Image (cartoon, grey):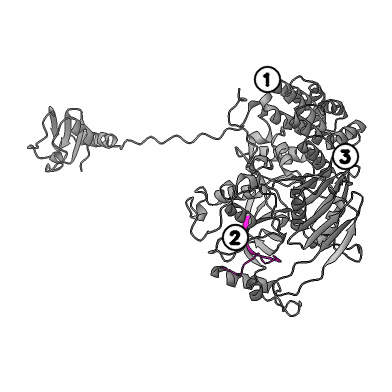
Amino acid sequence: MFCCDVSQIKNQGTRGIDQIVNVRYVCFVIIELDRVYCISDNWHIKFPPKITEVIVLRSHRLLSFAMMVCLLGFLGCETPTRDQPNAAPPPAPFTGPRFLHGTVGSMAKLRGYEPQLVSSFGIVVNLKGTGSSDVPEFLRRRLINEMSRKGMGNVRLNAKKWTPRRVLSSRNTAIVAVYGLIPPGATVGTSFDIWVTALPQTQTTSLAGGRLFTAELSLDGTNPNIQFSKTYANAFGDTYVSPAIKQVGDKLKYSHQRTAVILSGGTVTLERKLQLILNQPSWARSRRIADRINQRFERGVSDRNQTASAQTDMLINIVIPKRFSNNVEHFLELVQHLYVQGGVDFEPVQAAGLSEVIKSFPHQAQHVMLAWEALGRTALPPIRRMYDDPNLTIRLAALEAGTYHEDGLAVEPLVKLANSPDVQIRTRVARLLTEHPRSAAAANTIKQLLNDDSDSVAIAAYQALSQKRDSLFIQRRMMGQGTEFKFMLDIVEAQRPRVFIGQGKVPRIVIFNSYAGFKTPVVASLWNSRLLLKAMEPKDPLEVYYQPWSSENEALKPAKIYTIAPSVANFIFLLAQYATLKNPTQGLNLGYSDVVDALYTLDKQGKLQNKLIFQENPLAVEVAQARKLEFSPSRPETGLEGKIQPNFDLPSVGPGAMGEQLIGQKNRDKRSVRPEIGFGRNDQPAQ
């Protein structure tokens, strides 16, 4: 038996431990500094130099001493243990600015807040000869099976004429990639916009005026290697290509015509989950947060589930109450700015403390305002004291929080700000005054803002009134019903003539001043003379000649002449109206895209009295950003390592492909793609 400390021998300059190992009859050796103990019957043991003292004991003597030496050897041969690394410190219980510690957002982060990209391949039909019969081979069988499954070509459904193969071979159809962004917290039936683009290997020239055949959207649905996937939403509806494009090169204009938007064309079929993830696991804290959210945002009569429910010590499920379905982002902001502690004694004191914070740090006005709103109406007294603050940032934050709590005392300060020379302030005031429908002063100021010199102010006032469905200022007509819905036609009682083309959640055309008409004499020709207008005097009726489009294989369809009152509102109604038993008024039954194109062409010819204003749709930019995230290295399940595989040969979107003038990047809607509200991780507000 042998045991020794090798490092000590080497430190003394020995030639190696094997000099000791090879010694005969050595039963036990202990190295202690420069002394060696051994038990052996051999007196001729050779040890390395620099060992100054060797004690050799006969094995038949001092057996008890040998046993003691053996015990010391075992103790000396213990292998030194390696220091274990320190465990990672637990996450901080609170994050964000210190004045928000104790809020839901400081104790938990929101998961499922980012829009969810879904996609598929589809078919656009009813094009006017601008489609293509080109179909990629990997898609042909898939599309034929899908169309057959949905009844196309079925004799029983009286669709024998339109077989799948005939549809694909027509120049009135186009194969497209379909994209959509399902909003956070979306429930079954929630609608969202759809973005479609012609495939690059096809000869499609324009998607204007077409209709998307129902497509089933899924995650990574444009990956040709995936044959079966779960359906998250359906897409269907009329394609819209904005005619408001600046004079650019032919290549960019061609690319613009090959992409289209279907406003509210997507319908959610699978509900999305919103969850709060706590910074630290705690059942007590999880239940307390859920109870506080339910107390402050209790479910309505039509809500099936509570707003919040604790699932584990780390997860809380969130359900959007139906009263917040049109403003999900604001609701989630309020939830994250909600203090878990509550009570009548707490809220006024906390509101007063927030007043001091906003005075010292005005750049935190947005966070303070949301925290004021989340506290409830008992926080109003400290907020009211800020209604006349000399700092406009602080004053507007207080007025917005007071307006959220339906405080009538906020009306007078807002009316004073309506005359501000700053357009942004007037725009914000217009939005806030619509929240006071019972105030006569607010109503009079809204009328003034609807006729404001600035288009953005007048449109902001209209949009706020539209959300309230205020019939005092707006007369609404729905053009089309059900699956045949086209757009909303709103008539706003205003003096300054404007026409607003809305591309928001619902397609709409808004007429400011219903009596505004055309600049006479008007003689206009549109669409290769298929649409003609004529009126010689301002009070003369407007004559409209229209001949429907016919394909090369069809006979010419008969033309008709209509006579209407000479106003833009009547002209729009004529273009979109479809005669039914309930409403037998005759019309041309044109879609939203055709109506907008007619207005745009007349405006370019200088025939309209109304100023034409287009709302830009940011969907193309949002889809491009979502696609970059989908193929980023942070998603290992795609296996792409940040690069798009060759089979993802879809055209790129965004400023690089379409131009900033087409997608309105500067005027992007602020609907969030943020995963959370963006609390900083520093403990104190930024200086």
Q: Horizontally, is 404 left or right of 24 in the view?
A: right
User: Which of the 4 quarters of the picture holds residue 138?
Assistant: bottom right
Question: Which amino acid, by three-letter code, is at mark 3?
Answer: Gln
Q: Secondary structure at mark 3?
A: loop
Q: Position of residue 288 (x, y in %)?
A: 71, 37
Farthest residue toward the bottom? 155
Q: Which mark is residue 495?
A: 3
Q: Position of residue 617 (x, y in %)?
A: 69, 48
Name the residue at 61% across, 25% down: 684
> Which of pointers 3 and 2 indicates the residue nearer the eye?
3
Q: Secondary structure at mark 2?
A: loop
- Distance from label 2 to label 1 (Cα)? 51 Å
Q: Horizontally, is 194 left or right of 529 in the view?
A: left
Provide the residue designation for mark 2: 221
521 is higher (above) or lower (below) than 413: below
Q: Report the magenta residues as a range.
A: 118-135
Q: Position of residue 360 (x, y in %)?
A: 68, 20
Question: Which amino acid, by three-letter code, is at mark 1?
Answer: Ser
Q: Earlier in the sequence, mark 2 or mark 1?
A: 2
Is residue 335 visible to the viewer in this orientation of the structure?
yes
Residue 666 belongs to the span the image colors magenta: no
Q: Horizontally, is 27 left or right of 616 in the view?
A: left
Question: Which amino acid, by three-letter code, is at mark 2?
Answer: Gly
Q: Earlier in the sequence, mark 1 or mark 3?
A: 1
Is residue 506 visible to the viewer in this orientation of the structure?
no
Q: Earlier in the sequence, mark 3 or mark 2?
A: 2
Residue 122 belongs to the span the image colors magenta: yes
Provide the residue designation for mark 1: 360
- Distance from label 3 to label 2 (Cα)? 49 Å
